[in-house]
Each structure stands twice: as C-alpha cells, then as structure tokens.
Image: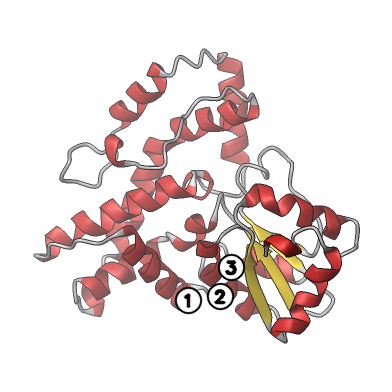
Amino acid sequence: MAELEHSNNAKNILKKFYRVDKIVFVEGSDDIPFWEIVFNKFYPSEVKIEPVGGKPKLKNYIEQVMQDEANFFVAMDLDYDGLFEHEIEHQAIFTTAGYSIENSLVTAESLSKIIKNLCRLSAAQEPKILTAEWIANSSQSLKPLLVLDIINQAQELGKKVTPDNADRFFQTTTCASLCSDKIKQHYEQLNLDIPEDTIEYWEAKVENSDLSVFDLTRGHFIFSAAMRYVRFSSKQFGKRLTISGDALYSNLIQAFELVFNTNHPHFKVYEDSFKLLPEVPE
C-alpha cells in the first residue's frame, strides 16, 4: 500500500485488481471484519476493505473524496467528532455510530450471547437482564469521566483522562463492577481545573446527544471492561473463564454478525448512511 498512497489513480484502479465494485479504506486491520459485515448488510455490490495504518493516514484519502476525485469509500471511527460538530459529511465517507467499532460490537445482546456460548448455558439462562444492568450501572459511573475526557480533547489539555484499560477502576480485583470513587480519585489527581460552567455545558451536550454514555466512551476502555465482565460474570454459572483480547474480539465479531439487525441500537444509523448512496435501493 505504501507505493500506492500518493497516487489517486492507483487507488481508483485497485478495485479492478481485486475485481470488486469499490475499495473501502479503513484505519487498521482490526477494522476489516466489522466493516465487511456492515457493507455486506447494506451495500448491493462487492467491496474490498483495505487498511491504511491508522486514522491520520486516512487524511489524504478523505481529501480526495471531498474533492470528488475518488471512486472509493472511506470508513473510520467517529471519535468525538459528532459532539464537536466536526463530522465530515460526504456520502462516500462512513463513520462508526459511536466512538469506535468497539462501541457497536459491545452491546447487551452480544455480551449475553457470548457468555451463554462460552458457559454452555441454555437459552433461558442467557444473562440478558444482568448484562443490560451492568451496562447501565457502568454508564452511570463513567459519565463524569466521559465529560472530562471530552473537555480535555476539546481544549487540547493533553491529559490521559480515559485510559485504554479499565482494570484500575473496578471495585475489587475479582469483580466487574466499576467503582465511582476510584474513577473520581483518578480524574481529581489530573488537576484539570475546569470551570463548573464548562462542565455543565458538556454534560448537557452528552445528555442531549442521540448516543449513550456507553456509545461515546473510548472503545478500548469499553472493550477492556467488557472482557472483565465476561470473565467474572461466568462465576455465577459455576464457570471459570479465561479469555484473551483476541478471543473476545473474535467472539464479538461473530456475535455482531448474528445480532446486527433492526434490533441493534446502531442499526438505523448505519442504514441511513448507506441510503445516501444512489446505488443503494430504498
């Protein structure tokens, strides 16, 4: 891909090489299975998903799309662009419904199905209510952290407000319940010194958003919290699960393929974005 990066013609002819209708350029290789499922659901022709090595490297591709010089698609994480009103509006540029792909992968339905399968439970034992409650309780604990993380990025304060790993914020080392006191202690130690009216402004933005706290929180954090939940929720079923990050990702992709339908909380967001394309039937 390196020798093709600066050649617009090369990008456009890649589809001929792969014998597909469109090339979809994405951030990284981990994004490929997710976007394949989404495009297979809504796009009427075959596509090839091609990673470029990170979101910054998509800038060149986005510029060409915006200048109507490209015959390819770009798909990337939304991050906080929706809240900052920095979304790039073009029918050939797709973004995740939430902060990243993890926010669409980690849902109550997908996690409960994964636990059901890994613990070999019956359909009646599938922990749907328990998982929905865990997400609701986690969201309540995470809201102050999310608001401060948004402000940190909006004002370019340069702090690491939301880490990639959630482990330090659980009540004990043997549970999956987030501890509001540990989260508060963490952000107070950052000494952000943010005026109360600024906090209230961004709290209102989050509250009025179409997305939930769980949707807006950084994907890596959500993923690590989900891994903890899958491991420790299995105890109540008499199981002791050990699951790696790669194994959880694989299970989430498999579950997403099953649950990505009109009942999925983000289904309509993706569906509506594809409806902007003239080749996609109503």
Mark closer to the observer (3, 2): 2
Find disc 2 in the rendering and name its residue: 37
Q: Tell me the element at label 3.
A: helix
Pick the front one: 29 or 112:
29
The reply to whether discs 1 and 3 touch (Cβ–Cβ < 8 Å) is: no
Q: Residues within 10 Å of mark 1 (few under 14, many from 20)?
A: some
- Amino acid of disc 2: Ile
Pick the front one: 89 or 121:
89
Q: Residues within 10 Å of mark 2 (few under 14, many from 20)?
A: some
Q: CA distance from mark 3 to mark 2?
A: 12 Å
Q: Is residue 269 left or right of residue 66?
A: left
Q: Position of residue 21 (x, y in %)?
A: 76, 82
Mark closer to the observer (1, 3): 1
The reply to whether discs 1 and 2 touch (Cβ–Cβ < 8 Å) is: yes
Find disc 1 in the rendering and name its residue: 257
Q: Tell me the element at label 1.
A: helix
